Image (spheres, rainbow, N blue to C red):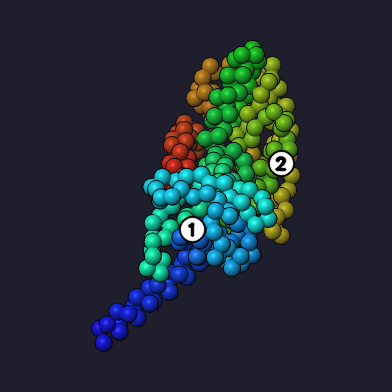
């Protein structure tokens, strides 16, 4: 009885493993005596096949050259697909047993897909997902670069920090989904209101930042403010709701108003905020944006280790 129970449990575990193997998102092969004996759905797609039977029972060297022994480190393989296209893949080779014989489990990842994922991750950690605008970390880095260019070219750069007045009331009255649609529309209008060389970022919930480059007089930044602020006063209609907004803005210019980034931001925040507590909160967010770079690096390391 115990033996029958053990045999049934083993069969159940094997069935679960086969199901997990077949439906894993990562391309997987099992190779024995140089022949592909198992290919999961993801591997079928990577090799340009439509079903596993197009790969199984074929020699692996028809598609790529594997080293004779498994190893702990990922390797790079050039794969020949069924459609004659070539792709580069990162692979790990793990020793296994198949039908009681020594085999090789081949874990693959499309290198191009990995590169796309890394690029997307880099983008996400430096951009606001709702509006697709740069976030405060990217904003601060862009401002540093703009100040350096202004110093080299003996010109000025202005920073405008803008906050939506009483935006919380929009969320309270209409809900966060409507609030998100309103913020996306604000982002669109701000982007349309600046020059191509300028930058618009979402700093915090209802706080936006504009970097206005290559100006000769501080007053030129006021021209932009006089263009974007009226645009925000135009009613916003989203989700069957009509919303009317106003905004407050503070403008400071480098180097005429401040010589360094933090004093420059402090001046812009002070000019744009009548609410002292809100101003302190925004300043803290702007001044502590840099640690997000470490988070981005950690996320990329995790992605890299996950592909091994």
Q: Which mark is residue 245?
A: none
Residue at numbered disc 2: 189
User: Residue placed farthest to the bottom in the image?
Assistant: 1
Horizontal relation, residue 214 to residue 41: left or right: right
Out of 301 and 241, give the one closest to the viewer: 301
Residue 249 in sight here: no
Relative depth, front residue between 153 and 10? 10
Residue 210: x percent and y percent? 63, 32
Q: Where is residue 154 in the image (x, y as percent from the top left)?
A: 64, 12
**Residue at (64%, 65%) from the top-left corner?**
50
The residue carrying pointer 2 sits among few (fewer than 14), some (14 to 19) or many (20 or more) residues within 10 Å by Cα, namely some
Q: Residue at 57% of width from left, 33% of height from top?
A: 139
> Under tag 2, what secondary structure?
helix
Mark 1 residue element? loop
Residue 142 appears in which quarter of the rendering? top right
- Spot occupied by residue 73 in the image (x, y as percentages of width and height): 41, 45
Q: In this view, does 64 lie above or below 192?
A: below
> Mark 2 and 1 residues: CB-CB less than 8 Å, in contact?
no
Q: In this view, does 269 lie to the left or right of 224?
A: left
Q: Residue furthest left?
A: 2
Residue 30 place in picture, x, y as percent: 47, 61
- Residue at numbered disc 1: 34
Q: Nearer the viewer, mark 2 or mark 1?
A: 1
Residue shown at the point (58%, 66%) measured from the top left: 52
Name which residue lies at 61% across and 51% down. Answer: 80
From this viewpoint, is residue 263 visible?
A: yes
* Neighbour tally class for label 1: few under 14, some 14-19, many 20 plus, Cα within 10 Å: some
Q: Between disc 2 and disc 1, whose residue precedes?
A: 1
Report the number of numbered marks. 2
Q: In this view, does 69 lie above or below 96?
A: above
Q: Is residue 91 left or right of residue 14?
A: right
- Gap between marks 2 and 1 measured at Cα: 60 Å
């Amino acid at each position: 009885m115990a033996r029958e129970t053990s045999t049934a449990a083993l069969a159940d575990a094997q069935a679960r493993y086969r199901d997990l193997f077949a439906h894993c998102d990562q391309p997987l092969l099992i190779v024995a005596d140089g022949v592909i004996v198992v290919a999961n759905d993801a591997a079928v797609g990577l090799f340009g096949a439509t079903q596993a039977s197009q790969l199984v029972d074929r020699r692996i060297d028809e598609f790529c050259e594997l080293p004779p022994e498994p190893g702990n480190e990922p390797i790079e393989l050039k794969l020949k697909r069924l459609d004659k296209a070539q792709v580069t893949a990162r692979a790990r080779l793990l020793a296994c047993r198949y039908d009681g014989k020594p085999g090789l489990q081949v874990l693959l990842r499309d290198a191009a897909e990995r590169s796309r994922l890394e690029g997307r991750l880099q983008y996400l950690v430096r951009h606001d997902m709702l509006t697709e605008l740069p976030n405060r970390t990217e904003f601060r880095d862009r401002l540093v670069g703009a100040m350096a260019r202004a110093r080299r070219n003996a010109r000025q750069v202005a920073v405008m920090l803008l906050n939506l007045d009483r935006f919380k009331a929009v969320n309270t009255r209409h809900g966060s989904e409507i609030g998100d649609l309103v913020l996306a529309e604000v982002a669109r209008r701000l982007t349309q209101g600046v020059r191509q060389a300028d930058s618009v970022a979402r700093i915090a919930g209802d706080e936006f930042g504009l970097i206005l480059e290559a100006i000769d007089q501080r007053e030129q930044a006021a021209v932009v403010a006089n263009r974007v602020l009226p645009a925000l006063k135009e009613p916003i209609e989203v989700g069957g709701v009509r919303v009317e907004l106003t905004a407050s803005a503070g403008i400071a210019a480098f180097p005429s108003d401040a010589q360094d980034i933090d004093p420059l931001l402090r001046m812009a925040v002070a000019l744009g905020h009548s609410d002292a507590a809100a101003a302190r909160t925004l300043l803290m967010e702007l001044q502590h944006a840099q640690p997000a770079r470490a988070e981005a690096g950690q996320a990329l390391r995790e992605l890299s280790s996950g592909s091994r």
